[in-house]
Amino acid sequence: MNDTTIHLALVDDWELSGSGAGDPHDLQFRPMRQLSEIYNKYGIRASFNAEVMQQLTFRDFQTQHPQLKNLADEWDASIQETFRQGHDIQLHTHPQWSSSEYRDGKWVLKGDWSIINYSLDEARQMLVRGKEYLENLLRPLNSNYRCISYRAGSWCVAPSSFMLSLLADLGIVFDISIIGKLKYDTRRIKLDYSNCEEDFAPFYPMMTDARRVSNKVERIVCIPTNHFYGSRRLTLKHHVSKIAARLSRSGTTTNGGTSGGYGSDWADASSVRRIYEKGVVPYIKGKHLISDLAQLDYSLMREMLASIRRRARATGLSNIPVVLGIHTKDIRVFDDIERFVSDISTAPDIKCVTLTEIARDLQNGTFAIKTRS
Ligand SMILES: [Zn+2]
């Protein structure tokens, strides 16, 4: 029997809906405080990926629309407050904000949803601006702060002739955009991670295609965001309750963009039928599930953890980093997340870590990084 310590990073993608819809108070400021309170109560430190394209756009429009300035200021204050409590803030970008209009109090986002469809110069400009924004915001609180990890909006990072090199140039130590077995073919997102060569442990990617493992040390590491296979019984039970919740919400909400998970954003969800077909079915593709705490109930979180432990032990390594997802905007019930956080905070084989701690441990040799041998 070997003892594998799982270095578990809870990594929230903190943002409005992909369409730009929703009130930042409801989808970001309040749930971030609630989530941080849970983390603080159980003494764990977690990470928030701040989606900066949204914030840069709010700043771009704040002169004509002073209410956007207030929201952008509150965004800054939320990030700083969370960081002061010991949680990490890292880089996340949704490029659809790169071309936007603000009409009658609503955003119309016209940019392509996938950063790999932009030119190298356009992608560089977005990432540089985002990284500088976060570093300028947080260095006054900690002069050592820097952006060291990246998660692409809608997970779109590969294949790309330039993305990984660009991230490495910017000092990003590791990327967490790969999710094994994920596949989307929607109007907005086309992505095929069904044949990733590594979907659990850290690896050196081929620099033009993070779905493949390089045969040598590279300038950047990939750590997949975890996925697992839920049991048919729990998956079906959870699926049915989510549909019921969406049906009941659809009677009271007029804003389709705030009603579902990110799957529904991607397909122009304008009806419950579309949310079902385009949102839920691809998300729960068979029993394949993204390890996203906002999308799972407590029983599925337990199954996820059992899967992580099985896979971690099978590596035979003493230490392995595992990255989970959360989307504050999608959290409906905090109780299940709290039960889960309580469990992991006392588990002897689990150490809750921030992304910055993972970067340090990748660099100091704590974690083995795979190459194609
Ligand atoms: Zn996102």
Image (cartoon, helix red, strand yellow):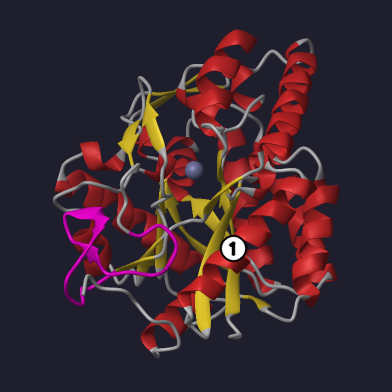
Whether 83 is among the magenta residues is no
Q: Is residue 111 left or right of residue 139?
A: left
State the SS at label 1.
helix
Closer to us: 145 or 178: 178
- Is 302 placed left or right of 22 in the picture? right
Residue located 32% across and 36% down the image:
191
Q: Main secondary structure of the magenta part?
A: loop
Instruction: Quadrant for residue 221, please give it.
Output: bottom left
Where residue 227 sits: x, y (%)?
52, 51
Is residue 27 in view?
no
x and y percent of residue 122 in the render? 21, 44
Task: Please provide percent x and percent y for residue 273.
Answer: 60, 9
Residue 333 placed where, x, y %? 81, 41
Question: Which residue extends farthest bottom?
Answer: 364
Q: Please, which residue is most extreme toward the front here? A: 1
Q: Look at the picture and state if 111 lies above or below 311.
A: above
As drawn, 208 above or below 82: above
Quadrant where the C terminus sits is: bottom left
Give the quadrant of residue 181: top left
**Residue at the spot of label 1:** 308
**Identity of the residue drawn at 35% across and 19% down:** 187
* 208 within the magenta span: yes
State the extent of the magenta-drawn residues as a range. 198-220
